[in-house]
Amino acid sequence: MKIFKMLLSLIAIGLIIYNFTKVDFNAPFEDDSVVAFITIFASMCALILLQILRISQKIDKQYKTRK
């Protein structure tokens, strides 16, 4: 599971970097730039969800060790 989470994080970071190269800053809300912004936003959401998962698993592990 740990490797899977790291792999998903790397894919999300890779997508963010790739899509930043696709944004046309002269016309940011036209054609491919909009798709790039949507993909950047979705990748950031995925990173946030993965971070929440990591934190919740750490909390669960601490809770189980105290019992």
Image (tube, helix red, strand yellow):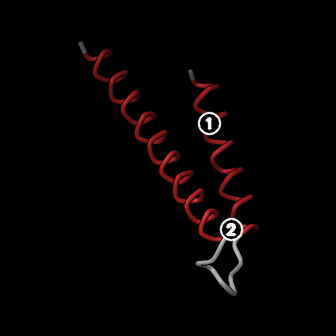
Q: Is residue 24 above or below residue 34?
A: below
Left or right side of 64 for 21: right
Instruction: State the residue at coordinates (46%, 48%).
Output: 48
Left or right side of 43 for 63: left
**Label 2 crowd bin: few (<14), some (14–19), many (20+), radius 10 Å:** some
Disc 1, SS: helix
Badge 1 is on which residue?
A: 8
Total numbered labels placed on residues in the image: 2
Left or right side of 47 for 20: right
Q: Quadrant of the N terminus?
A: top right
Residue, far bottom: 26
Comes first in the chain, label 1 or label 2: 1
Q: Is residue 24 above or below residue 50?
A: below
Q: Please name whichever residue, 13 or 22, is drawn nearer the observer in this view of the structure.
A: 22
Q: Amino acid at mark 2?
A: Asp
Label at residue 32? 2
Q: Disc 1 vs disc 2: which is toward the camera?
A: 2
Q: Amino acid at mark 1?
A: Leu
Distance from the alpha carbon under mark 1 to that under mark 2: 24 Å
| Coordinates of residue 34 in the picture (x, y in percent) | 59, 69
Instruction: State the residue at coordinates (68%, 42%).
Output: 11
Disc 2, SS: helix
Q: Please name whichever residue, 4 or 26, is drawn nearer the observer in this view of the structure.
A: 26
Instruction: State the residue at coordinates (63%, 34%).
Output: 6
Label at residue 22? none
Instruction: State the residue at coordinates (65%, 71%).
Output: 33
Q: Is residue 65 above or below residue 27?
A: above
Q: Quadrant of the C terminus?
A: top left
Q: Quadrant of residue 58?
A: top left
Q: Are marks 1 and 2 in contact (CB under 8 Å)?
A: no
| Coordinates of residue 61 in the picture (x, y in percent) | 37, 21
